[in-house]
Image: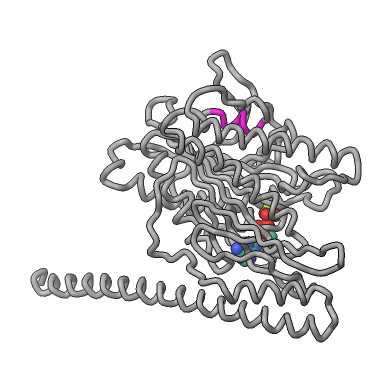
Amino acid sequence: LQQQHKPELISEQRGAGQGQRRNVVTEIERIKKNREQQRQLHAKLKEKQLHIMMRQGNPNWEFLNMINQYRSRIVFRPLQESDPVEDHQITVCIRKRPLNKSEFARQEVDVISVPSKDEIIVHQPKVNVNLKKFLENKCFKFDYVFGETCCNELVYKYTAKPLVQTVFDGGMATCFAYGQTGSGKTHTMGGNFQGKTQDCKKGIYAMVAEDVFKFLKSPEYKDLNLTVSASFFEIYGNDVFDLLENKARLRILEDGYHHVNIVGLTEVAVDSMDEVIELIERGSIARASGQTSANRNSSRSHAVFQLLLWTPGTDRIHGTFSLIDLAGNERAVDMNPPNRQAKMEGAAINTSLLALKECIRALERRGGHIPFRGSKITLVLRDSFIGEKSKTCMIGTISPGMASCEHSLNTLRYMDRVKEHRATYKQRT
Ligand code: ADP
Ligand code: MG
């Protein structure tokens, strides 16, 4: 009986394997087709938009026309799924989101072009003294630039994914999303929004967790018997709020050994994806709650999701992956804050983002002074800025609309400075 069943079983397995492979192939084809359709749709929409704007006498149609003309001369070579993933200690990249429905409805002009996998152009509208309209086209270069048709999976592949290895090798990994409110930080880190509901399985938090579990079970690392725990908190000004415990307010303490501790922070042991997704969902809902209140809003706080790998039987951390959805940077550069509180908030966010930039630059320098006391976020992430094994990735998110042009330029300049030091450092050695 057994003999009779055996071949069947094998053929069943084979069948399943081939089926899976076929599924993967059709899935890739489907994604490719989707992207191409999306691209064509966007091109068509832009063309249509130009005609509508002209007909309605929208003064920005001239800018859109100039941008379209500029674009027609570009040979677009966007990032391809087959492009190699480079190994950097610090990866700096940009993601442009598509214009959304309300921006289309407002007839916003898309002023951002992504000609290649590492370049981005801002077509800044200008008017000269004779009221003649012209464009100032500013080009920036980064490790990667993700265009509007890139999905979270592709962004993940080139940003946080390579850092999973770092954590298993006993290092500290950090991945930041930096940008203006509404530019796509939470969409990238926490997961796609479909309307107001978020698909947490499609965010970088979840994708990192998924790969961490894969590594745990791999032949290379399973003998380490590492265990995983997760925490999720928010930093607002000088305060820390526990997103897994009703936003309980917590204190940061430093012990005699310079260990930085968040006293009473909830840390949940996790060993399945379902558990992680539940935590991400719970924390994201907690973060978004109370958003409408005048004095607290998620765009003014930094959210930190951490996965910690523990060596069993000890209280030793093997490695940590910290994923940070930073506060909106527009407040940091707002020249005319409406009131005193907004001004103080803006100043605090500014200080923390500048401290962060300096700490990342110090990581690249390896050694020397690390100004991690400059803000709470850098204090909490202190250990991530030291050590040869630490790796960092920053994703700058960009809103494509003309109304966001100044903010987009600010984001690009900041991101450029995070990288700038590395360029000069490399030249010198
Ligand atoms: P932030 O966290 O930077 O304030 P969000 O992530 O909340 O911004 O994004 C604002 C809106 O834009 C959301 O509705 C989101 O779904 C949408 N969005 C952001 N990035 C993308 C993207 N890459 N593709 C499609 N929609 C996006
Ligand atoms: Mg957000």
Who's the residue at 60% across and 49% down the image?
177
Who's the residue at 51% across and 38% down the image?
424
For residue 94, side relative to residue 109 (left or right): left
For residue 110, side relative to residue 415 (left or right): right
Q: Position of residue 370 (x, y in %)?
A: 57, 25
* Quadrant including the N terminus: bottom left
**Which residues lie in the magenta part?**
376-382
Q: Position of residue 207 (x, y in %)?
A: 48, 54
* Quadrant including the C terminus: top left
Quarter holding residue 300: top right
**Secondary structure that dominates the magenta span:** helix
Colour scheme of the rendered structure: one colour
Q: Nearer the viewer, residue 402 or 310?
A: 402
Q: Nearer the viewer, residue 41 or 300?
A: 41
Who's the residue at 30% across and 75% down the image?
19
Q: Position of residue 140 (x, y in %)?
A: 59, 54
Residue 50 vs 144, above or below: the answer is: below
For residue 426, side relative to residue 330 (left or right): left
User: Residue pushed farthest right?
Assistant: 339
Residue 424 vs 51, above or below: the answer is: above
Residue 197 is at least partly visible in this image? no
Who's the residue at 72% across and 34% down the image?
351
Q: Position of residue 146 (x, y in %)?
A: 54, 61
User: Residue pushed farthest top?
Assistant: 256
Residue 306 is at least partly visible in this image? yes
Q: Nearer the viewer, residue 240 or 150?
A: 150
Is residue 380 found inside the magenta-colored segment of the image?
yes
